[in-house]
Image (tube, helix red, strand yellow):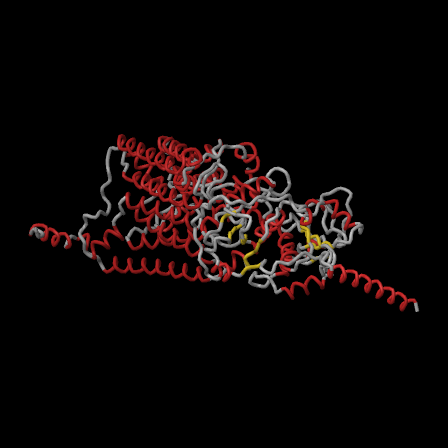
């Protein structure tokens, strides 16, 4: 008896909500609350790039961390941004400042109306971080090369060591878009269920479950293991095919839907230091068009913070033998 | 138009019947075996290139190693032998090959640098070039390396190619090198924090641009040539020259059996250094030794968990790795190709090994290894690749190491065999 009353009430609520949204969109006030527009061109293929290498509107940026890889050979016309110095603040833990980023982007010859295409090594992790910073500072058209540097090389496409020398561009960074970046207090609210945003932890399952504090060989770690309460674990790699290209949009929607992420609620992605999470940020926000923030403080900030709740299924204790 | 005079023609006929140009069946056989070994190495390089686990950097590294093995052996590019000839006997011909290698390489590097980093701006160094810090650790490392060369009879690269010539003493020496690397790794953290971390890294193009740096380097090499000529007592003209008759047997004689001209040897070493930097990494022969030592010690849990700053420094720094690094393929190429060249030229000879020679070789090797680790490279990595890359540390290493070799030879440390 009560069951039917409840389900009736549920149906009624959803009907009213649906009608409200429908009437709002009819009169043109915003789309669904948790959906930004997906960019149908967010991912470019190597073929597209090959035919657009001399298109003056297309500006190519490589963000690769392997030393010397860019210098020895990059895609024709690509300008190098260095993640460790160009795209972050080197003293404070922060992204590159508005003024520094404007200077950097202008030196790469990028204009307000440029199509910025980024690529790099490590499956575009650092290129995706670059894409996030571009969007954070108001760039209009930002895309990633599907498969990154590795696929371009594997396909035997041409590389050159010639460094471009572009004329100064006229891009100026806007004030950082608060809708794209999450800070600790907002994340703690989600952890305490005071916010309905969805957290996506994109690290490995062992990191998520607290079996390890950080992947082998990485110094930057947190003194607590586990994950932020309420977070779901969707590894960054599961968004890619074996050759490093992005899975189809339908597959990506299904992948996240299975973890309870359907874009109806705002999403926050995080990882260990923020760079892999920018990759998933790109998938969720640029390809799927969900409303997504990157929490770049990630586990190295959260797991080191005093007095925040943590879930650690493995029960590992820091320092205990 | 004048035609060759009869006297020239008859001279040539006389020359080609010169006994030096007549090959015995044994000599031909040895040369064929030598060529077959080189062919097998090249085949190995090809298969490495097709193996996704290794790829073209490994293949190219092996080809570079093969070239170096042949050039070192044929050109007698042994830093210690060259220094000893000059210091003991005033025979300075070999020094020319080092000077030419530095000048050729510096010219090549400046072209590559202009490609990699068009404007030296003081903010960035060119990727992975051997531009290291100048510290008391570098001075101590270079001095130890110099004494190690005298005691063991060669530098690390020298020992590698001399294994191929049948030098048994290279074996205890290279064993000592691994021990020396281990000792240096164990003491690394204190040394790094007290001496190296804040030490200045001086790259000449930051101050003089590429043109200025190249001019200064060439002038400095020119001055060294003048100083060398001043101290020259004898010259060794016993090497292959273009004046040798132009017949197949005489060309074979020049290529296989006669020592190569020091200028040609030096130019080839400089060119290969440039190619190596353009395609893979600067030349060096100690990275694999450092890697092997580090991996070995690490697997025995003998190393501190963190070696401060080591992986961020420029030079022949070993990493932890179970597989053969690119540098390992260079070393393999040097040893085996040198053997092939020595065999073809009839210079392969197992040198008997005395107990005293083994002990001095081992001790010298320890000094070589410790010095190379602390200096982040050796005669090839820091001196050659460093000076070619306009690193002031290369000059500091070279000067201190040469001074130590002089002192060591005056003390007759090289006679302990």
Q: Nearer the viewer, residue A296 or B317?
A: A296
Q: Residue furthest right?
A: A1
Write the residue at 45% across / 41% down.
B130
Question: Can you say whether B92 is above or below B254 in the image?
Answer: above
Q: How many marks?
A: 0
Question: Can you say whether A167 is above or below A291 in the image?
Answer: above
Q: Is residue B96 left or right of residue A46?
A: left
* Residue B330, position as x, y percentages in the image: 42, 51
* Residue B157, position as x, y percentages in the image: 39, 45
Residue B167 visible to an observer of this rendering: no
Residue A38 visible to an observer of this rendering: yes
* Residue B259, position as x, y percentages in the image: 27, 47
Q: Residue furthest left?
A: B6
Write the residue at 61% across / 37% down.
A91
Q: Quadrant of residue B193?
A: top right
Q: Nearer the viewer, residue A138 or B152?
A: A138
* Residue A307, position as x, y percentages in the image: 78, 43
Q: Is residue B113 left or right of residue A190?
A: left
Which quarter of the rendered picture does the N terminus of chain A lie within? bottom right
Q: Nearer the viewer, residue B323 or B242?
A: B242
């Amino acid at each position: 008896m009560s069951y039917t009353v409840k389900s009736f009430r549920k149906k009624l609520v959803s009907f009213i909500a649906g009608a409200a949204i429908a009437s709002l969109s009819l009169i043109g006030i915003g789309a669904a609350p948790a959906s930004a527009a997906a960019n149908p061109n967010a991912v470019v293929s190597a073929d597209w790039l090959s035919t657009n290498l001399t298109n003056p509107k297309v500006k190519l940026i490589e963000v690769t961390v392997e030393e010397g890889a860019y210098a020895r050979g990059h895609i024709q016309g690509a300008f190098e941004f260095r993640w460790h110095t160009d795209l972050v603040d080197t003293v404070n833990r922060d992204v590159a400042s508005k003024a520094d980023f404007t200077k950097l982007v202008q030196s790469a010859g990028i204009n307000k109306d440029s199509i910025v295409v980024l690529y790099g090594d490590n499956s575009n992790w650092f290129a995706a971080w670059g894409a996030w910073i571009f969007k954070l500072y108001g760039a209009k058209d930002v895309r990633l090369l599907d498969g990154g540097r590795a696929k371009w090389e594997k396909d035997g496409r041409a590389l050159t060591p010639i460094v471009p020398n572009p004329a100064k561009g006229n891009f100026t960074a806007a004030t950082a878009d608060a809708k794209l970046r999450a800070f600790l207090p907002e994340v703690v609210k989600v952890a305490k269920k005071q916010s309905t945003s969805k957290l996506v932890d994109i690290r490995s399952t062992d990191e998520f479950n607290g079996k390890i504090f950080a992947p082998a060989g990485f110094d930057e770690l947190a003194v607590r293991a586990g994950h932020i309460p309420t977070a779901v674990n969707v590894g960054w790699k599961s968004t890619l095919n074996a050759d490093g290209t992005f899975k189809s949009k339908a597959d990506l929607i299904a992948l996240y839907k299975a973890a309870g992420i359907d874009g109806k609620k705002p999403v926050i992605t995080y990882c260990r230091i923020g760079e892999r999470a920018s990759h998933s940020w790109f998938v969720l926000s640029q390809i799927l068009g969900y409303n997504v923030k990157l929490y770049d403080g990630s586990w190295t900030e959260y797991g080191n913070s005093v007095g925040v709740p943590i879930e650690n299924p493995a029960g590992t204790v820091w320092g205990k033998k | 138009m004048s035609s060759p005079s009869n006297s020239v023609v008859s001279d040539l006929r006389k020359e080609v019947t010169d006994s030096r140009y007549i090959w015995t069946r044994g000599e031909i056989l040895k040369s064929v075996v030598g060529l077959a070994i080189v062919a097998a190495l090249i085949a190995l390089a090809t298969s490495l290139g097709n193996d996704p686990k290794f790829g073209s950097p490994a293949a190219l590294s092996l080809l570079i190693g093969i070239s170096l093995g042949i050039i070192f052996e044929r050109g007698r590019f042994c830093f210690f032998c060259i220094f000893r000839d000059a210091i003991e006997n005033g025979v300075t011909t070999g020094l020319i090959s080092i000077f030419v290698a530095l000048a050729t390489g510096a010219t090549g590097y400046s072209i590559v640098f202009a490609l990699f980093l068009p404007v030296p701006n003081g903010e960035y160094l060119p990727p992975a070039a051997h531009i290291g810090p100048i510290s008391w650790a570098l001075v101590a490392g270079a001095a130890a390396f110099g004494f190690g060369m005298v005691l063991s009879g060669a530098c690390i690269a020298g020992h590698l190619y001399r294994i191929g010539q049948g030098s048994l003493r290279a074996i205890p020496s290279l064993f000592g090198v691994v021990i020396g690397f281990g000792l240096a790794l164990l003491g690394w953290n204190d040394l790094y924090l007290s001496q190296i971390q804040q030490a200045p890294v001086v790259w000449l193009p930051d101050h003089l641009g590429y043109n200025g740096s190249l001019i200064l380097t060439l002038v400095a090499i020119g001055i060294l040539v003048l100083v060398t000529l001043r101290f020259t007592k004898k010259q060794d003209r016993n090497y292959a020259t273009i004046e040798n008759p132009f017949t197949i047997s005489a060309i074979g004689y020049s290529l296989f059996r006669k020592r190569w001209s020091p200028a040609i040897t030096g130019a080839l070493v400089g060119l290969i250094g440039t190619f190596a930097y353009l395609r893979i990494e600067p030349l060096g022969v100690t990275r694999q030794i450092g890697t092997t030592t580090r991996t070995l010690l690490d697997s025995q849990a003998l190393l501190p968990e963190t070696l401060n700053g080591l992986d961020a420094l420029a030079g022949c720094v070993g990493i932890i790795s179970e597989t053969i690094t690119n540098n390992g393929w260079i070393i393999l190429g040097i040893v085996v190709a040198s053997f092939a060249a020595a065999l073809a030229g009839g210079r392969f000879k197992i040198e008997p090994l005395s107990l005293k020679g083994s002990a001095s070789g081992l001790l010298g090797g320890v000094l070589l290894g410790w010095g190379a680790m602390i200096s982040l490279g050796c005669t090839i990595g820091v001196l050659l690749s460093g000076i070619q890359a306009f690193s002031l540390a290369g000059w500091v290493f070279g000067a201190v190491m040469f001074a130590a070799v002089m002192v060591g030879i005056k003390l007759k440390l090289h006679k302990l065999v």
